[in-house]
Image: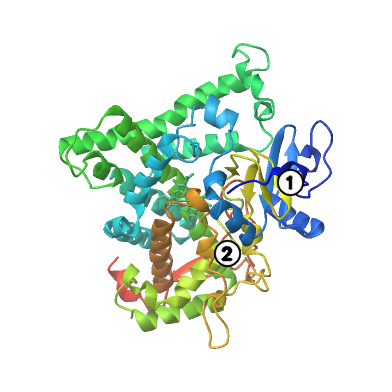
Amino acid sequence: YFVTRSARHQPLPPGPEPKFFSGNIHQLPRSEAWKVFAKWSEAFKSPILFYRIFGRKFVVLNTFKAANDLLEARSNIYSDRPTGWMYNELANRKMGVFFISSQHPRFKVYRRLLHVGLNPRAVGDYHEILDDERRILLTNLKSKPDDFMAHIRRAAGGTILKVTYGWTVADKDDFFVSLMEQSFAIVSEIMKPGRWLVEVFPLLRFVPSWFPGAGFKRKAAVWREQLSEVDRKPYAWAKAQLKSGNYVPSFTSRHLSPEDGHALDSEEEDIIKWCSAALYAGGADTTVSGLASFVLLMTMYPDVQRRAQAEIDEVVGKDRLPTWADEASLPYVTSVIKEVLRVAPVARLGLPHSVLCEDVYLGYRIPKRSTVIANIWAMTHDPELYPDPMTFNPTRFLATPDKPPQQDPYKLVFGFGRRVCPGSHFAQVSLFLNIAGILATFDISETVDDQGREVDPVMEYSSGITNHPLPFSCRIVPRPGASSLVLEHL
Ligand code: HEM
């Protein structure tokens, strides 16, 4: 793809009027940026927007078409990540899978390794683990339904730690789960927009740590150490297990014992270490988000729940749990999952991309090194793509004789181009097994207050990279008759 010579004369994409020095920092939304960006797009009548914070340039893509045209079709130049000075440099995470530069030779190696460990054939090997963890989830929901969020977290974390390292999560205070949760807390602190001056004035990174005001450097040094434990400790454990011969086959064990039997060098080990760490970082919190939104939406839409349960009863029967082999015969259940991820997309603004060179799109100039944000929330709520977008309606994904199904949200909620989520198949299988399992065995409904009135849950979400419903209550009870057989055997 070649940029025309006149690129310099093209206008920037529209956006709010910047101040000379600080740019648009004063207009940036403090919350729900995805909704504000979508409104800006309407106001400026453009699917793409531009804003600036001091010297940093941002382009927001608010339609699926724009994301496809740039991040997919021109993925050779749109697949880099912006430099986060605090995260990449000071906390030393630049070799991590999520933020490694697309120009680094390791990028392709990581992507290949992740593909080998997470493609549909590989995921086939994890079905037993997924099945075991689902049984634990259903048993926990039966015995302590009010703690459903803790059970969901345990299920997501337990599955991914088993798949990645062969580690079995303890019921309470699991060492690796605590380690991972600590790292999430640190990363979300680092990623808070506008939190660190060094992001806009990168030269500050050279200020010595003892210097007054250089607290950010001292913090970064502590975090650097704490974050590195997340990569080192579970990996070292898995390696020791493999050596002892007493191990559960996992992503790590599979890569540590290559088929040709060659001894791994330290570079190869480092690669496996970073990729394993990425599985937990990418797989745990995202699955929690999807499952929590599912439970919330089921309390709000009992008719949808009943129809999905009826489909399972008819296709699978009442004496076993649905398996992945049933997926193709359960189109309504699959549509429910798609609709959950559409109305409550897990990563509303995806992860930021960065463009390597100047480009032109729709007559607008996209400056070199702009951070490019795919506004996934705007795409999943675009009335052109999803008529009546605020309505939760899984049938939009079922074809009828006179209407084709609406755009498959799996094509957008997992991101784009060379950075597209490598865990998307794993996520689809894991969400399907857990959701179909819960539908088969439980009824989810609103709670009632002291006066016996139903408490209507509301769709309210936290801010942050992943999308989590604010705490809500619901009733989860075993389905009368339907799957008592299954539950008795849990
Ligand atoms: C519902 C579940 C999930 C959703 C919605 C989701 C979504 C995403 C999105 C939007 C991105 C950014 C893509 C881009 O930059 O364009 C991403 C990246 C990534 N995801 Fe997922 N994800 C999910 C589950 C998982 C799982 C289960 C794993 C691993 C087992 C995983 C591993 C990763 C990794 C390693 C990346 C970084 C890829 C890179 O930077 O090259 N994700 N995911």
| Mark closest to the chain's N terminus, 1 or 2 | 1
Residue in front for this viewpoint, 106 or 344: 106
Q: Position of residue 52 (x, y in %)?
A: 74, 39
**Residue 267: mark in rendering:** none
Residue 53 vertical placement versus 336 (above, below): above
Assess whether mark 2 and mark 1 are in contact (beta carbons under 8 angstroms).
no
**Residue 50: mark in rendering:** 1
Q: Residues within 10 Å of mark 2 (few under 14, many from 20)?
A: many
Q: Is residue 413 left or right of residue 57?
A: left
Q: Is residue 122 left or right of residue 230?
A: left
Q: Residues within 10 Å of mark 1 (few under 14, many from 20)?
A: many
Residue 248 vertical placement versus 333 (above, below): above
Q: Can you tell which quarter of the image residue 85 is in?
A: top right
The nearer-to-camera label among 1 and 2 is 1
Q: Is residue 428 left or right of residue 30?
A: left
Q: Can you tell which quarter of the image residue 179 is in?
A: top left
Which quadrant is the C terminus positioned in? bottom left
Residue in front for this viewpoint, 391 or 408: 408
Identify the residue at horizontal 22%, vertical 37% (top origin). 241
Residue in front for this viewpoint, 239 or 139: 239
Q: Position of residue 187 (x, y in %)?
A: 54, 36
Confirm whether residue 372 shows in the render: yes
What is the secondary structure assignment of the residue under circle 2? Answer: helix
Residue 126 vertical placement versus 193 (above, below): below
**Residue 342: mark in rendering:** 2
Amino acid carrying mark 2 in the image: Arg
What is the secondary structure assignment of the residue under circle 1? Answer: strand
Q: Position of residue 400 (x, y in %)?
A: 53, 85
